[in-house]
């Protein structure tokens, strides 16, 4: 379909300055009526009441975010457009990363491709299409992956909760190659595991890479390490690589613990590792043992803005209990991946956790998502990961 055939949606005055400034979301209540007649995923031109152009995007009448802007220019979104955006994203990773063979290749809005996530693990590529508009464009995406990267395996991990909001089906499917079980890849001289079929998100969390490296600077070699919500055991593996005496991995999923066991075995850490299957929230209430270093990396505790206050209380209570598990003078490594929780409010929850635990806490370092997950200045929503290293006295 040529640009001349794109239907037009009309932006209300209240949203014009925000969209003009580079924000890529247009909410349903920011559009004049008429957009509801178009099918989900339709490519549309965006104008104001004076017919001034605000670019092109994809539309979904079922979603609160009705339009996701692909370009501020009046351009045709075709194979050439998609290849150009993907080429730019790939080149950016090659410039800013030492190892672009294991990274997030596309980070949705931050790379000008709203609704698309692409993670690369050497010869495995996993992508997520999160919107109806991106579903219509993924054939071009897959063609680019085959043409530019020639991976042995491509997996579509299209089961995000965001797809439910877009009224899209949920599935995980192989688009290329054969995959038996989890996939082993190497990063930072460690053998790690991605589980794109049975795992979470794309199968491995690349966003914490710099934070995992950061903690190694604080390890002296005789510490005990506790990895809560361990998933595939990356935090524990980095700590064992740095020389901790022992690491205990705790997760509610037997699959996650099996991945952690495999990672420890692959790297020769098995004799220093132990594993506990338990609901972490319950386990930290009941545990009386203390550790030199405690890592807590929970899943997002809210994906709904109306529940942000309750989520902050949950972060406070969880971190308060974790602080009690740290030996005096030891370290707490704590994370939040809830994009709806601001950095300021999360830090305040940590301060309240220190008060509640009756422990004196000193912050030593803060972190965020790795640079292959860049933050778009016009969209604070693209910053989601928060990380802190604190000494608990």
Image (cartoon, helix red, strand yellow):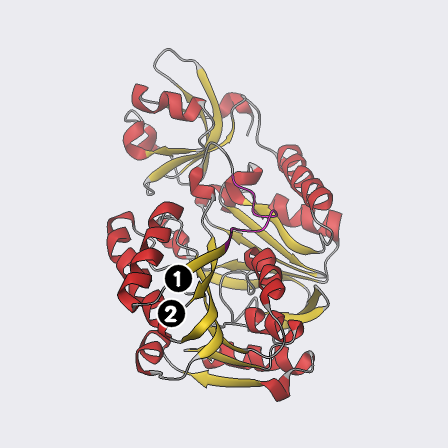
**What range of the chain is rendered magenta?**
365-375
Tell me what residue is drawn at x 54 percent, y 39 percent: 110
Q: Position of residue 381 (x, y in %)?
A: 42, 42
Q: Which residue is mark 2?
A: 323
Q: Position of residue 151 (x, y in %)?
A: 72, 58
Q: Is residue 274 left or right of residue 229?
A: right
Q: Are marks 1 and 2 in contact (CB under 8 Å)?
A: yes
Q: Position of residue 226 (x, y in %)?
A: 48, 76
Q: Secondary structure at mark 1?
A: strand
Q: Secondary structure at mark 2?
A: helix
The image quadrant where one finds the N terminus is top right
Q: Position of residue 47 (x, y in %)?
A: 41, 19
Q: Is residue 247 left or right of residue 320?
A: right
Q: Is residue 251 above or below residue 16?
A: below
Q: Quadrant of residue 140?
A: top right
- Badge 2: how crowded within 10 Å, few (<14), some, or many (20+)? many
Report the disc number at residue 361. 1
Nearer to the camera, 184 or 383: 383
| In the image, farthest residue toward the bottom | 271
Tell me what residue is drawn at x 36 percent, y 54 percent: 164
Predominant secondary structure, magenta span: loop
């Amino acid at each position: 379909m040529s640009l001349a055939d794109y239907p037009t949606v009309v932006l209300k005055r209240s949203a014009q300055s925000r969209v003009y400034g580079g924000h890529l979301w247009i909410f349903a209540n920011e559009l004049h009526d008429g957009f509801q007649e178009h099918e989900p995923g339709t490519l549309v031109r965006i104008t104001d009441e004076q017919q001034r152009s605000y670019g092109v995007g994809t539309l979904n009448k079922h979603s609160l975010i009705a339009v996701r802007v692909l370009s501020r220019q009046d351009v045709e979104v075709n194979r050439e457009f998609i290849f150009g955006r993907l080429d730019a994203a790939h080149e950016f990773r090659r410039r800013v990363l030492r190892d672009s063979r294991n990274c997030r290749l596309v980070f949705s809005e931050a790379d000008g491709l709203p609704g698309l996530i692409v993670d690369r693990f050497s010869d495995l590529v996993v992508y997520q299409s999160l919107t109806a508009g991106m579903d219509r464009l993924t054939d071009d995406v897959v063609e680019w992956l085959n043409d530019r990267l020639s991976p042995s395996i491509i997996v579509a991990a299209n089961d995000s909760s965001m797809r439910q909001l877009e009224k899209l089906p949920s599935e995980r499917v192989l688009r290329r190659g054969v995959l038996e079980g989890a996939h082993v890849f190497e990063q930072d001289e460690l053998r790690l595991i991605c589980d794109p079929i049975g795992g979470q998100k794309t199968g491995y969390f690349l966003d914490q890479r710099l934070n995992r490296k950061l903690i190694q600077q604080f390890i002296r070699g005789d510490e005990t390490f506790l990895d809560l919500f361990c998933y595939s055991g990356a935090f524990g593996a980095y700590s064992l690589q740095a020389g901790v005496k022992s690491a205990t991995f705790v997760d509610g999923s037997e699959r996650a613990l099996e991945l952690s066991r495999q990672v420890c075995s692959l790297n020769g850490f098995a004799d220093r590792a132990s594993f506990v299957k338990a609901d972490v929230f319950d386990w930290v209430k009941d545990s009386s043992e203390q550790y030199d270093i405690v890592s807590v990396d929970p899943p997002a505790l809210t994906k709904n803005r109306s529940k942000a206050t309750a989520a902050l209380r949950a972060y406070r209570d969880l971190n308060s209990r974790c602080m009690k598990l740290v030996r005096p003078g030891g370290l707490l490594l704590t994370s939040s991946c809830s994009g709806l929780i601001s950095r300021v409010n999360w830090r305040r929850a940590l301060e309240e956790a220190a008060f509640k635990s009756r422990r004196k806490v000193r912050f030593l370092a803060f972190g965020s998502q790795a640079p292959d997950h860049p933050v778009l200045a016009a969209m604070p929503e693209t910053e989601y990961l928060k990380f802190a290293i604190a000494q608990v006295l």
